[in-house]
Amino acid sequence: MVSPRLAVLLKQGVGDAIKSRAELAAFLGTSEGAAQRVVAQLLAAGVAAQSRDSLTISGLRTPPFERLIAVEAKISDWQRVLVQAYRNLQFADESWVVLDHAFARPAIAQLDRFRIAGVGLASVERGRGLFIHHAAATQGPMSLAKRWQAQSVLSTRALTRKIVSGAV
């Protein structure tokens, strides 16, 4: 269990390139004392080893989740939800807005805004199902750090659910 803000250190090629506490402090933009507290967290999580002069952070070959798809569902207010869905592209491979079909017409009239943002638009109607008005662009996350933070949060939630349900 690594803090979401530190999860980017688990990406192969990031954390394993850091070989000392001083390098970690420079990477994080913090003091060596603060970096030592981070090292303690990484050691406790079992993803780092430290000797007198060196630090080894074990990167993950693959992230816990292959793809992240974000969905913002609202009854209406497509402009507000489009902004939220666009923000999700910081960490997600795709982001979608899903509206109540009865309130989707104003958003459908503005499909160019969804295209420009790279956000998908769909609506749902009880008894009739899901209508795709514009497919989301699959573009990958805008921020590697945000992607790894999301991976960490989702992994923690999944593990917590397994533990609570007794599946582990």
Image (cartoon, helix red, strand yellow):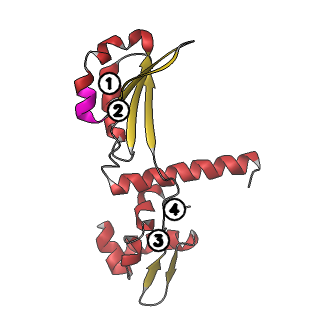
Residue 63 location in percent, x, y? 48, 59
Q: Is residue 111 visible?
A: yes
Q: Going 44% across and 82% down the picture, which residue do you hit? A: 55
Task: State how far apart marks 4 and 3 are (Cα).
Answer: 12 Å
Kindly check if marks 1 and 2 are in contact, taking CB atoms under 8 A apart as contact: yes
Write down the quadrant of residue 131 in the picture. top left
| Secondary element at tag 3 | loop
Outermost residue toward the top in this view: 102
Residue type at mark 3 is Gly
Closest to the observer, 6 or 68 = 68
Q: Which residue is labeled 4 in the image?
A: 2
- The answer to which of marks 1 and 4 sits earlier in the sequence is 4
Bin the neighbour count of mark 3 within 10 Å (Cα to Cα): few under 14, some 14-19, many 20 and up.
Answer: many
Residue topped by disc 1: 80
In magenta, the rendered stretch is 113-118
Distance from disc 4 to disc 2, alpha carbons, whole Å, reads 26 Å
Q: Between tags 1 and 3, which lies in front?
A: 3
Looking at the image, is mark 2 or mark 3 nearer the viewer?
3
Q: Are marks 2 and 3 in contact (CB under 8 Å)?
A: no
Residue under circle 3? 59
Which SS class for mark 2? helix
For the point 46% across and 49% down, the residue is 67
Crowd band around label 2 with a 10 angstrom C-alpha radius: few (<14), some (14–19), many (20+): some
**Few, some or many C-alpha atoms within 10 Å of disc 1 (few <14, some 14-19, many ≥20)?**
few
Choose between 71 and 149: the one closer to the eye.
71
Point out the frontmost of discs 4 and 2: 2
Distance between the alpha carbons at the discs numbered 1 and 2: 7 Å
Q: Which residue is mark 2?
A: 84
